[in-house]
Image (cartoon, rainbow, N blue to C red):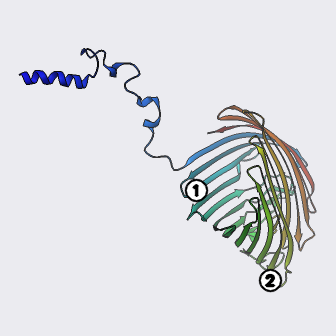
């Protein structure tokens, strides 16, 4: 009994290190002392045991457009959903994107004028070697009355393209080497004319295969010189009705240029080269084209970004062209300015031209535009845009259009 009497006060003292023993002035009952960090004071204790694999970003835009041009007036309503999935790991990065444009004319049926899906995967084998892979799919149909589309077309052909590419890059001191390979498939639907006639474009369906090599050398911390070489192959499904045979061809290109990077403020690239396109059929002469390419990006501060570029393309003529080869030239310039946390402004200009080998047909066009986004809150923005487009071709003549678009955009 004496032993128990001596033990109980000792236990009580170990449980209640302070106080008079009444348990009402225990340190653990003093506000702010215990619990020292309640679980609801932060979200750390409520997190899932793992992070989601993808960061998801989505938006949904509803827009109304009024167009007045050479082909008359029209009013369209567009629904534009888009989603982006991104994942960045220790060695890998994955990006998937999808968008669509659903059009409802004032008179006519609802149509999907554009559907685009794409994805890229990158994986670092080591600090100097990176593997990349990508896939893409698009379904597009130009709207009747669009500048550049013949005025006698009431339903433009539906264009479906899809493909993928693989690549590997390796850093070797001041040298960097890249190998790429790609395969793309293009199919074209039928064209309906205002006369009621239907034109089958199946002869333009083709496969495009390409492999390339790029070697760059960092001559200074700012400037890099590079050379590129590629070999491509165009394979058509059917013989051409105008030529009488399949215009299958192999295209070889050689280019050289220089790239300059000044921190994250200014980046400029300029290159030139030559393209040689040879046809399998003896009845078509080879096509030699001088290539020019230039790209410029200027970001003096986070609120202002300016980009500009010029490029040369060599490709099959497509359903709206003629001859054996389309040689195109294009230039663009864009400015984006964030005035404040609510208002963002933008402006753009572009020019394009094309000639067709084996045909007297030519195309030229240009466009101007300006727009603004006003954020109502963190997830809602009101948008407004104005665009002017003009095109002139030897087959369709001069066409132009003014377009005003207003809408609302909801985003994550």
| Residue 277 pos. (x, y %) | 81, 76
Q: Closer to the camera, 120 or 353?
A: 120
**Rendered position, 275 above or below 301:** below
Q: Residue at x 89, y 56 (%)?
A: 365
Q: Are marks 1 and 2 in contact (CB under 8 Å)?
A: no
Q: Residue at x 72, y 70 (%)?
A: 214
Name the N-terminal-most of marks 1 and 2.
1
Q: Closer to the camera, 260 or 206?
A: 260
Q: Classify mark 1: helix, strand or loop.
A: strand
Query: In the rendered image, which residue does mark 2 sit on?
Result: 281
Disc 2 residue crowd, few under 14, some 14–19, many 20+, Cα 10 Å? few
| Quarter where residue 412 is shown | top right
Query: In the rendered image, which residue does mark 1 sit on?
Result: 93
**Image quadrant occupied by the N terminus:** top left
| Residue 362 pos. (x, y %) | 91, 64
Q: Is residue 133 left or right of residue 317?
A: left
Q: Closer to the camera, 82 or 261?
A: 261
Considering every residue shown, the one lying at the far bottom of the view is 282
Q: Residue at x 46, y 29 (%)?
A: 41
| Residue 233 pos. (x, y %) | 73, 75
């Amino acid at each position: 009994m004496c032993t128990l009497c001596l033990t109980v006060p000792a236990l009580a003292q170990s449980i209640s290190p302070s106080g008079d023993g009444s348990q009402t002035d225990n340190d653990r009952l003093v506000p702010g002392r215990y619990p020292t960090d309640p679980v609801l004071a932060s979200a750390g204790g409520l997190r899932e045991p793992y992070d989601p694999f993808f960061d998801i970003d989505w938006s949904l835009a509803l827009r109304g457009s009024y167009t007045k041009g050479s082909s008359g007036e029209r009013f369209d309503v567009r629904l534009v959903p888009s989603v982006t999935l991104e994942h960045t790991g220790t060695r890998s990065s994955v990006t998937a994107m999808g968008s669509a444009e659903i059009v409802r004319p004032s008179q006519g049926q609802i149509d999907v004028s554009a559907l685009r899906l794409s994805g890229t995967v990158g994986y670092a084998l080591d600090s100097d070697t990176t593997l990349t892979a990508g896939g893409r799919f698009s379904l597009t149909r130009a709207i009747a009355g669009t500048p550049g589309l013949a005025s006698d077309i009431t339903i433009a052909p539906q264009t479906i393209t899809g493909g993928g590419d693989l690549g590997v890059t390796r850093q070797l001191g001041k040298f960097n080497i890249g190998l790429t390979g790609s395969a793309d498939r293009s199919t074209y639907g039928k064209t309906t004319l205002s006369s009621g006639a239907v034109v089958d474009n199946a002869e333009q369906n083709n496969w495009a295969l390409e492999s390339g090599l790029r070697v760059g050398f960092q001559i200074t911390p700012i400037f890099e010189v590079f050379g590129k070489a590629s070999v491509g192959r165009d394979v058509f499904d059917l013989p051409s009705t105008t030529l009488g045979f399949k215009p299958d061809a192999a295209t070889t290109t050689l280019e050289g240029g220089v790239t300059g990077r000044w921190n994250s403020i200014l980046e400029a690239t300029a290159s030139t080269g030559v393209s040689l396109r040879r046809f399998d059929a003896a009845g078509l002469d080879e096509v030699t084209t001088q290539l020019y390419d230039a790209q410029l990006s200027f970001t003096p501060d986070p609120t202002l970004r300016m980009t500009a570029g010029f490029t040369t393309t060599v490709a099959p003529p497509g359903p709206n062209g003629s001859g054996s080869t389309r040689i195109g030239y294009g230039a663009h310039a864009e400015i984006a300015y964030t005035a404040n946390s609510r208002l963002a402004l933008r402006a753009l200009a572009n020019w394009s031209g094309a000639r067709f080998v084996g045909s007297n047909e030519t195309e030229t066009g240009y466009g101007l535009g300006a727009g603004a986004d006003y954020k109502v809150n963190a997830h809602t923005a009101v948008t407004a845009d104005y665009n002017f487009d003009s095109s002139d071709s030897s087959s369709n003549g001069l066409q132009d259009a003014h377009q005003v678009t207003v809408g609302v955009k909801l985003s994550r």
